[in-house]
Image (cartoon, grey):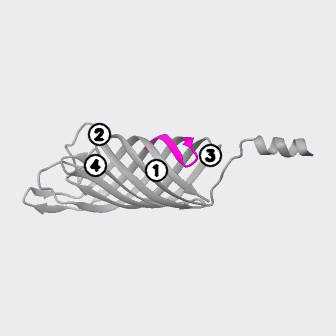
Amino acid sequence: MVGLLALAGTAGAARADIAALFADGHGGIESGGGSGEANGTSSNQSGANAGLGYRLGARLLIFEGYYDHTGFGDGAGVTRGIVGLRGGFGSNDVRLVLRAGAGVVEEQGGALTERLVGMPDRRGPVGRVGAALEGRVAPMLLVGFGVDAETFELPAMSGAFGSMPSTVGSDIFANLHLMFELGV
C-alpha cells in the first residue's frame, strides 16, 4: 500500500485547470492582410510584416476571452477582442492548444490593408482560428509556437488621405510566445 502511494505521488500528473488567467508577449510575422477584396478590388499591400505584441485573457472550462495588440512599427498595429472556445490536449509539460472565436478587430495605420500616412483607425468584425504547441519551462511559465488565421471586414471611409472602400480580408500570423498562466 505504501509503495502504491509513493508511485502515485511520483507520477507526472496531467493538469486541467477549470479557470485560468494568462498574459503573453509575442513576436511574429503576419501575411499582409490586404490579400482580401476591397469592395471588388484587391488591396495593394504585399509582403510579410514583423510585429511585437501582447495578449491578456481569461479561461473558464472551454470558454476563452482575450484582448491582444500587435504593433508593426510606424504607427501601424492591430488590436483584437475575441471570445470563443479553446481546447488543450497533452500533458502538464507539453500541450497542443486549438482555439476558435469571433470578436472585434481594430486596424491602426492601415496595418491590415494599406499603410497610408494619416490613415484613421477602422473597426470591424473578425473570426479567428488558431493552434499552438506550448511547453512548460517553469510552474507558471510556458513557451510556444502558434499560428492564427482570421477573416475580417473593415468599413469604408474617407479623409485627408483619400477614400477607402470597405475591405473584406484575411490574415495569417505565425508567432513565438512566452506565456504566464495562473490557473485553478
For label 2, the crowd category at 10 Å Cα-Cα, with few meaning under 14, some 14 to 19 and many 20 or more, is some
Q: Secondary structure at mark 1?
A: strand
Question: How far, Cα to Cα, is label 1 from label 2?
Answer: 20 Å
Q: State the extent of the magenta-drawn residues as a range.
A: 135-147
Q: In the image, is residue 145 part of the stretch drawn in magenta?
A: yes
Question: How far, Cα to Cα, is label 3 from label 1?
Answer: 16 Å
Going from N to C along the chain, the mark reached first, 1 or 4, is: 4
Give amino acid for label 1.
Val
Q: Secondary structure at mark 4?
A: strand
Give amino acid for label 3.
Phe
**In which quarter of the view is residue 80 placed?**
bottom left
For label 1, the crowd category at 10 Å Cα-Cα, with few meaning under 14, some 14 to 19 and many 20 or more, is some
Q: Which residue is mark 1?
A: 129
Above/below status of 108 relative to 35: below
Q: Which residue is mark 3?
A: 89
Asked whether the beta carbons under mark 1 and mark 2 sit within 8 Å of each other, the answer is no
